[in-house]
Image: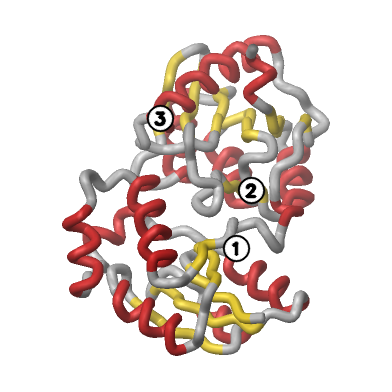
């Protein structure tokens, strides 16, 4: 069995490659320069390093390797689109057809483009279901009464910014939105919100309404908790079964050490 891997930053591509090898897959990776880990080369059969925008080159690589299915994993810093993109003719034609450049629209259209060329995009978690966030409170501490109020308000607002395709996360404290995720990413949002909140604020990170669950699911890890520790954010709220959590045991241990609550919830809890 062959599978293509379109790899951005973070540990997700590496985790996938290791699991795919165990499952007997032959892995052919396209890795983004300045994003994907160089360690990925040790865990795949072939790898082609590319800059953002080299769509034609990617399609040629997959065609040469006879790839009929692929996954899109890992992060790409949004600020890279201003400094490190090298669009080829295929990418320019793709961009010209786009009505707007919202994240979800671009990713879905890109997946459609690949599928039109014979490459089916698989869900990011199809080999790693254990990464999907389970419902419940993971930590010793549970959110307090005022924090629960912020969770309810924050959930509604986070869902709305997701509907507008602005971002997936907000920081809220005492009913006031302190930070909204933008191009700088979740960790920067935590630090901005935590600084304004002065301690005791809540981070809510949700799937966008109608989000294509094959890619770009909300993800958190130990780095998320460390940013919360550094910034005085005391509660992390995730969407159960619709988000990814890396290093869950380490996340929970670090949160317990610093009195942070982690809860994974579902929409029906607010109805």
Q: Establish if 68 lies above or below 231.
A: below
- The residue singled out by tag 1 in the image is 12
In the visual, does 54 lie left or right of 181?
left
**Foreground of the two, 7 or 120:** 120
Element under label 1? helix
Element under label 2? strand
In the visual, does 214 lie left or right of 87?
right
Percent of width and height locating residue 68? 53, 75
Residue at 54% x, 65% y is 71
Q: Are marks 2 and 1 in contact (CB under 8 Å)?
A: yes
How many angstroms separate mark 1 from mark 3 (CA)? 25 Å
**Foreground of the two, 16 or 194:** 16
Q: Earlier in the sequence, mark 2 or mark 3?
A: 3
Q: Establish if 111 lies above or below 99.
A: below
In the visual, does 214 lie left or right of 145?
left
Q: Earlier in the sequence, mark 2 or mark 1?
A: 1
Q: Quadrant of the N terminus?
A: bottom right
- The residue singled out by tag 2 in the image is 244
Residue at 64% x, 29% y is 235
Q: Which mark, residue 163? A: 3
Residue at 59% x, 88% y is 45
How many angstroms separate mark 2 from mark 1 (CA)? 10 Å
**Foreground of the two, 183 or 111:** 111
Image quadrant where residue 136 sits: top right
Q: Earlier in the sequence, mark 1 or mark 3?
A: 1
Percent of width and height locating residue 161? 40, 28
- 10 Å neighbourhood of mark 1: few (<14), some, or many (≥20)? many
């Amino acid at each position: 069995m062959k599978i293509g891997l379109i790899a951005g930053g973070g540990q997700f591509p590496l985790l996938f490659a290791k699991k795919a090898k165990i499952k007997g897959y032959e892995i052919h990776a396209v890795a983004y320069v300045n994003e994907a880990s160089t360690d990925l080369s040790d865990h795949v059969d072939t790898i082609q390093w590319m800059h953002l925008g080299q769509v034609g080159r990617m399609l040629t690589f997959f065609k040469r390797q006879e790839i009929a299915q692929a996954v899109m994993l890992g992060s790409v810093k949004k600020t890279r689109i201003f400094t490190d993109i090298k669009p080829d003719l295929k990418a320019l034609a793709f961009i010209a057809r786009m009505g707007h450049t919202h994240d979800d629209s671009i990713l879905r259209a890109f997946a459609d483009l690949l599928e039109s060329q014979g490459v089916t995009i698989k869900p990011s978690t199809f080999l790693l279901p254990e990464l999907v966030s389970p419902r419940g409170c993971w930590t010793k501490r549970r959110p307090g009464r005022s924090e629960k109020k912020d969770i309810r308000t924050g959930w509604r607002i986070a869902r709305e910014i997701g509907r507008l395709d602005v971002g997936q996360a907000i920081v809220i404290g005492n009913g006031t939105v302190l930070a909204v995720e933008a191009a700088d990413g979740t960790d920067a949002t935590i630090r901005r919100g935590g600084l304004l909140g002065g301690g005791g604020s809540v981070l809510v990170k949700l799937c966008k309404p109608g989000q294509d669950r094959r890619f770009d699911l909300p993800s958190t890890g130990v780095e998320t908790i460390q940013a919360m520790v550094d910034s005085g954010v005391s509660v992390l709220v995730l969407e159960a079964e619709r988000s990814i959590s890396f290093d869950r045991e380490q996340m929970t241990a670090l949160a317990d050490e610093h009195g942070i609550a982690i809860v994974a919830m579902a929409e029906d809890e607010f109805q």
